[in-house]
Amino acid sequence: MQERTERLSKRKNYIVIQGRSSPEIPNMVIDPLRPSTNARCSENAGCGYETECYSADMGGPTVTKVIIEPAAHLSGLITCPGDKSISHRYALLGALATGRTNVAQYSSGADCLATLQCLRSLGVTIRHHRGSGNDDSCIEIEGRGLGGFSASSEELNAHNSGTTLRLLAGILAAHPFKSTLTGDSSLRRRPMGRVIDPLRAMGAELQAKSNCPPVTIIGGQLQGIAWNPAVPSAQVKSALLLAGLHATGQTTVREPAATRDHTERALTLFGVEVARSGLAVSITGRAMPRARNVRVPGDFSSAAAWAVAAAAIPGSEIEITDIGLNPSRTALLNVLQRAGAKIVSELQSEKDGEPIGRLTVAHRALQPVIITPAEVPSLIDELPLLAALATHRGGGLTLTGASELRNKESDRITTLVKGLRAIGANISEQSDGLIVTGDCTLTGGTVDPKGDHRLVMAFTIAALGASEPSTILGADAVGVSYPTFFETLKSLRD
Ligand code: S3P
């Protein structure tokens, strides 16, 4: 591999090394309406890497290594890009609605761009405007109405996005044509039986070898069902509610544990009635969603990286504004409090059905924490960051009941254990979790997040507490949910 090194920061906060990748590195989504981002590269001392990584004209994907220097402390006031989960839902409901939907602060991450690309292939007109903020973007969707998609002449590529694939599977199960949903090498190993089985029970034809993508769907008239998923999964619940929206009769999903409720809130916002009773949620089919102008709050799971960094690094205090504070997402704050951090969370509005507010996290002496299986579903995307927190002085983590982490963008248990151990952590792998003892200072080293955006962020936060610099391989994967992650890190060091 040919490599090029650029020193991007005089302060040596990190150095970026770029080169063409080998073919197995997953390709990133390129938004054809945003081709001009290359131009920002040279101005962006300290963060130019992100723009080149997504450039359409480099003739192939790139590999980016980022070197993370230890941090003395982090402080500042920041915002985060639009929430990934909510962006997907607003785009899908806008496409199914009657009328034109405008979505402000749509996530700039590659996952949400994959949803837009799939929708365009299904005949939906979407215009993409640059917003006013740093990485805000506004999209305008011409709704096609329920059942109004047209067959795609090509496979629908969800790239790295499980949410795109599973939620679209629910919708396409109700469309009377053949569709094939696929993704990158990570997505093609993720389990889809959890949506295939109930969608078949509703009347659609679905095929997938070993229940992994590609998934071929021949949709048709669906009948509502009552389904009890075996694992708590907002993606499964949402796929079934979106299928149920098109079906005859009522569809009820009874979850084994509560998961994020953005689909329920978004359906209500778009004028569709949803009934909730304990862990059960029901929808009566064939209610037409109505177009709305909506704004996506900042992504709590992106903010979580900075909340954890502030909790971990002595002398740090970080304030995050305009952040989604939906209670089904914020369990991390309770764990950070147990770990010793000072947390102030202030709810400011409940705009567009989602609570939004301000969050301040400050370091206090760290303590080890135990995460119980019951807490896992509401912390699922933040668990890698909590493992990183545990590697900082005074920290520690015992995590059980989290085998679902093995079904994410990578096997997050094995990849976390290997990566954190490679930079000096005292960590042991369990079949359903891990144990970290924060009794040593990390040495630094080289880690491979295996193309997993959440692990790029987790390894970075761990590396900030090491005695020597660390190298993160394939750090461009962070663009799946948080393309400006390293820019924000730089601003918090300044
Ligand atoms: C998501 C749900 C979660 C989460 C993923 C996004 C969603 O997955 O891990 O990043 O948007 O519904 P599961 O609910 O399937 O665990």
Image (tube, rainbow, N blue to C red):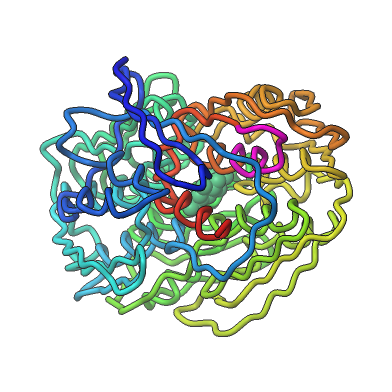
Residue 451 spot, x, y in % from top left: 45, 31
Residue at left offset 27%, top offset 37%: 157
Which quadrant would residue 77 be assigned to in this image?
bottom right
Residue 225 in sight from this viewpoint: no
Picture quarter with the C terminus: bottom right
Residue 383 spot, x, y in % from top left: 68, 44
Above or below — where is 103 with respect to 435? below
Residue at left offset 41%, top offset 35%: 16
Residue at left offset 27%, top offset 49%: 42
Picture quarter with the N terminus: top left
Residue 329 spot, x, y in % from top left: 62, 61
Residue 409 versus residue 169: which sits nearer the camera? 409
Above or below — where is 385 with respect to 261? above
Residue 263 in sight from this viewpoint: yes
* Outermost residue toward the bottom in this view: 349
Above or below — where is 355 with respect to 400? below
Region rendered in magenta: 459-469
Is 264 a magenta residue? no
Is 463 a magenta residue? yes
* Outermost residue toward the left in this view: 153
Residue 417 versus residue 166: which sits nearer the camera? 417
